[in-house]
Amino acid sequence: MELWQEMLRQSVDSAKDLVERFEFDPGQATQLNSLFHIRINPYYLSLIRYPGDPIWLQCIPDARELEDDGLPEDPLAEDSHSPVPSIVHRYPDRVLFLTTSQCSMYCRFCTRKRKVGDSTKINMKYIQDGIDYIAKHPEVRDVILSGGDPLMLTDFLLERILKGLRDIPHVEIIRLGTKMPCVLPQRVTPKLCKMIKKYHPIYVNTHFNHPWECTLEAKRACEMLADAGVPVGNQAVLMKGVNDDPDVMLELVRKLLTMRVRPYYLYQADPTKGTNYFRTPVSKGLDIMDKLRGHTSGLAIPHFVIDAPGGGGKIPLLPQYVIGRAGKNIILRNYKYEIFTYPDLEEEPVGHAPPVEKAYLRKNGKKNGKKEKVEV
Ligand SMILES: *Cc1c(COP(=O)(O)O)cnc(C)c1O
Ligand code: SF4
């Protein structure tokens, strides 16, 4: 057994265990357990500094998960974009491929709580169906292995999947969505990296939410992936009490760059049942973005996105930089709130109209017709 597997075996894995080992009762322990699995491996557990801290909040079950917050279980309507159980096909040229229900730590804010940890919903037996689906859909050029955490699979099983995908000529890139570098960096072994290297181009998106997660072990794991030629990106979730503070986020994105990890997305928390206590107002995210852009390396700036409820995909949000127009000029403000004027060109003919206008014209059957006022 490899070290990481041994560590997994030593995880706190039930509310009862929490109560026994830490004399901590999250309240309604049994109910919490049946609602969403508990697993905190010893590495991640060791990052907790005090009860209720940003690490604790992410992994320790909380009675608030049981409150009826009126939120949906599947806010992103993934299940209705799922042609076979292991695939979510929402965008034209790429798919999510759910390869395992397991994670090395169950995040209390997980947006896929309805499935994750439940092997009747995400299962090895659906993997071949997933590969067959991708093989039959030549438009799929980007496959994102997700779950659960695909690095919960053994190297052997993971390699079988990668091989299966690489046998499909139209699959150009493969991404691994894994939290392992953050929650169980011991999973990233020389053997794993050597295997992954054979199936390039492979990208990894990992998931750090707080600077305390940027340990020496985590750094080593990210560097090993980078040394194996894997570009590593980070997808963070904005959460109350965890990272809803511009200084914390600034420290996180800077630390990530030193670990050779490029911040990719900052997600507005999805409105998922049992996670409402983590949500922040959208204005908080915009405020954080405003305090990052210009104040640190452009390389460190993620895209702030809302994954549209109902399955509309990721929608980027930016602080307001355009203040207005004055004739041909566009009035902008910079990161220091100083005002600048850019001499814009005359508006292009309708064929090059901005997207909203174009969509409106398309809907109204006027491809090349006169310009009409767009009603918003
Ligand atoms: C996030 C996501 C992707 C990948 O989106 P990118 O913007 O390309 O990173 C693909 N499919 C689904 C269903 C997703 O939720
Ligand atoms: S690692 Fe990802 S899939 Fe697993 S519990 Fe955390 S957020 Fe959910």
Image (cartoon, helix red, strand yellow):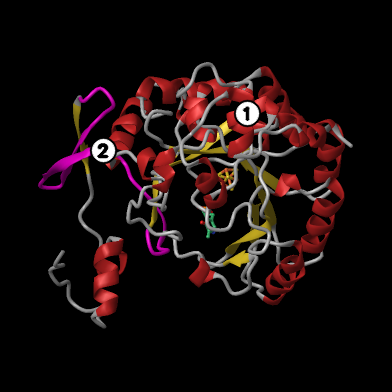
On residue 283, the disc is: 2
In the rendered view, does 126 fall on the left or right side of 343? right
Quarter of the image containing the C terminus?
bottom left
- Residue 129, how many percent across, how many down? 72, 72
Q: Secondary structure at mark 1?
A: helix
Question: Does residue 253 appear anywhere in the picture?
Answer: no
Q: CA distance from mark 2 to mark 1?
A: 41 Å
Q: Nearer the viewer, residue 345 or 107?
A: 107
> Which of these two is toward me, 216 or 260?
216
Residue found at x 87% / y 50%: 156
Relative to 96, residue 271 above or below: above
Q: Amino acid at mark 1?
A: Glu
Magenta residues span: 309-337
Name the spot of residue 242 as percent of width and height, x first. 43, 29
Query: x%, y% of residue 134?
Result: 69, 70
Question: Which quarter holds ligand 2?
Answer: top right
- Seen from the viewer's position, the closer of residues 340 and 252 is 252
x 21%, y 79%: residue:
369
Question: Residue 349 got which mark?
Answer: none
Q: Does residue 197 belong to the magenta stretch? A: no
Can residue 191 be seen here? The reply is yes
Local SS, label 2 = helix
323 magenta-colored? yes
The amino acid at mark 2 is Ser
Specify the quadrant of the image occupied by residue 260.
top right
Residue at label 1? 20
> For the point 84% across and 46% down, which residue is it?
155
Q: What x and y, as percent, mark residue 174?
A: 69, 53
Mark 1 surroundings: few (<14), some (14-19) or many (≥20) residues within 10 A: few
